[in-house]
């Protein structure tokens, strides 16, 4: 496709590198195209690939924050409010999920990894104009098998809630199919306690009627446990890793697994943050997710990146930005981001630091710009 216009933003971030004031030829589809000879329009903003939200829960409703910090009070609050699908009336959760997906795309998200309890959000992601994966989350510490629905990647919820055989088999099958899979890991100290047969989880699970008689408490850390199950591989997207220490970060790095951090959710639930600097120092690929509206004020990747930038000011803004635009995190194999993916214009910021300063900058997909009119930055 040849270009219909040429624009010159303050910066173009291509998913890994930032380019200052480049001239970008642009096809009618909003992707890059050869644009020699066209008049150049100066654009007040920054162009980047569509944002990638690697971990959210479209179906989960906002709930009031509990008075007490910690994962268990938060989970109790979510259950008491009926904020997540538990097998009854899926449409009650899918209808708002549709609205949230449309709003996410309008705000610049192009790709989404959704953790779904209904297993029915793939169509919602596509209908909203995004690419992505419906990770169908299953629980059952005493259930080694679950049926697999069409258009889903089945995933375990967490080490304390899912059977080790199910964790091992989903990890193995995802790797064999060249797909990412995901698990909540090391979000709260109670996970490691559970694997030692201690803490609140054994009692909670028994109270829920789960049979733990066949479960061998391995006495390993959550990361070492995944490794022992053969599930710590390059296909694994480990979500949170708030409690993960240096030895386990080394394990993750050696296995080339990816970590997805959700710092606003961590602040909300436990008040603690993962060692993102330690992850980067080890060469671990770090991506971001917003988690759900039950622990995050919105599903906006740029707001998530701004929070991460504030929490870890030593990390250069280009590295932070790559965590929210890494399309490979949800695809298979090496991905050339530009010019194959739709591009986004964030209007107003002059530098990458401005982009991440927490301002809710207006965004427009380049495909939505009217080719016959100059770009008007509405500040
Ligand atoms: Zn989550």
Image: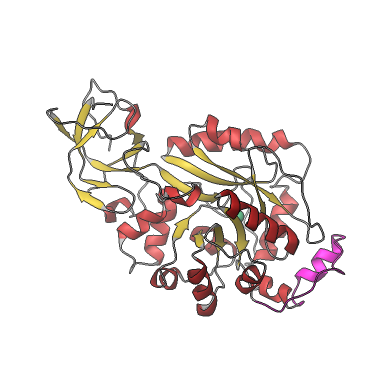
* Residue 108 image offset from top left, x and y in percent: 41, 40
Q: Is residue 301 left or right of residue 216?
A: left
Decide which of 214, 191 is in the foreground and name it.
Answer: 214
Where does the image place residue 34, in percent across and percent down from the top left?
A: 21, 32
The answer to if 212 sits in the magenta stretch is yes
Which corner quadrant of the image does residue 314 belong to? Answer: bottom left
* Rendered location of residue 72, percent (x, y): 70, 65
Ligand 1 shown in quarter: bottom right
Tell me if 43 is positioned left or right of 333 in this view: left
- Compared to residue 269, the image places residue 146 above or below, namely above
Q: Residue furthest top?
A: 372
> Is 92 displayed left or right of 18 in the figure?
right
**199 to 115, vertically: above or below:** below
x, y (%) of residue 269? Answer: 59, 63
The answer to which quarter of the image holds residue 317 is bottom left
Residue visible at 77% across and 49% down in the picture: 146
Q: Which residues are magenta?
A: 197-220
| Residue 85 appears in the picture as rendered | yes
Dividing the image into 4 quarters, which one contains the C terminus? top left
**Which SS type dominates the magenta stretch?**
loop
Q: Nearer the viewer, residue 216 or 100?
A: 216
**Vertical side of 52 occupied by 364: above or below:** above
């Amino acid at each position: 496709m040849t270009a219909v216009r040429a624009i010159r933003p303050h910066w173009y971030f291509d998913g890994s590198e930032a380019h200052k004031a480049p001239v970008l030829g642009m096809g009618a589809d909003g992707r890059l195209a050869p644009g020699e000879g066209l008049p150049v329009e100066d654009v007040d903003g920054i162009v980047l690939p569509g944002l990638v939200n690697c971990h959210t829960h479209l179906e989960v409703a906002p709930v009031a924050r509990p008075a007490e910090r910690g994962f268990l009070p938060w989970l109790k609050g979510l259950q008491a409010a009926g904020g997540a699908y538990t097998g009854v009336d899926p449409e009650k959760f899918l209808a708002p999920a549709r609205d949230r997906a449309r709003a996410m795309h309008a705000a610049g998200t192009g790709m989404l990894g959704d953790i779904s309890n209904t297993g029915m959000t793939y169509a919602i992601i596509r209908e909203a104009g995004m690419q992505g994966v419906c990770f169908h989350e299953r629980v059952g510490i005493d259930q080694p098998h679950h049926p697999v629905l069409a258009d889903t990647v089945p995933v375990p919820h967490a080490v304390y809630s899912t059977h080790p055989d199910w964790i091992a088999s989903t990890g193995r099958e995802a790797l064999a199919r060249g797909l990412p899979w995901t698990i909540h890991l090391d979000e709260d100290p109670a996970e490691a306690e559970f694997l030692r047969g201690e803490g609140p989880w054994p009692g909670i699970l028994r109270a829920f009627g789960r049979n733990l008689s066949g479960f061998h408490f391995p006495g390993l850390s959550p990361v070492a446990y995944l490794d022992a199950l053969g599930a710590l591989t390059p296909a694994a997207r480990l979500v949170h890793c708030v409690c993960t220490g240096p030895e386990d970060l080394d394990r993750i790095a050696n296995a080339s697994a990816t970590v997805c951090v959700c710092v606003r959710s961590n602040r909300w639930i436990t008040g603690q943050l993962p060692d993102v600097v330690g992850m980067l120092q080890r060469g671990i690929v770090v991506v971001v997710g917003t988690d759900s509206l039950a622990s995050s004020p919105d599903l906006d990747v740029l707001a998530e990146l701004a929070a991460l930038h504030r929490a870890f000011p030593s990390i250069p803004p280009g590295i932070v930005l790559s965590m929210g635009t890494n399309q490979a995190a949800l695809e298979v194999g090496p991905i050339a981001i530009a010019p194959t993916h739709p591009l986004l214009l964030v209007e107003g910021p002059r530098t990458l630091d401005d982009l991440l300063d927490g301002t809710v900058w207006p965004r427009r997909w380049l495909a939505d710009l009217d080719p016959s009119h100059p770009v008007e930055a509405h500040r």
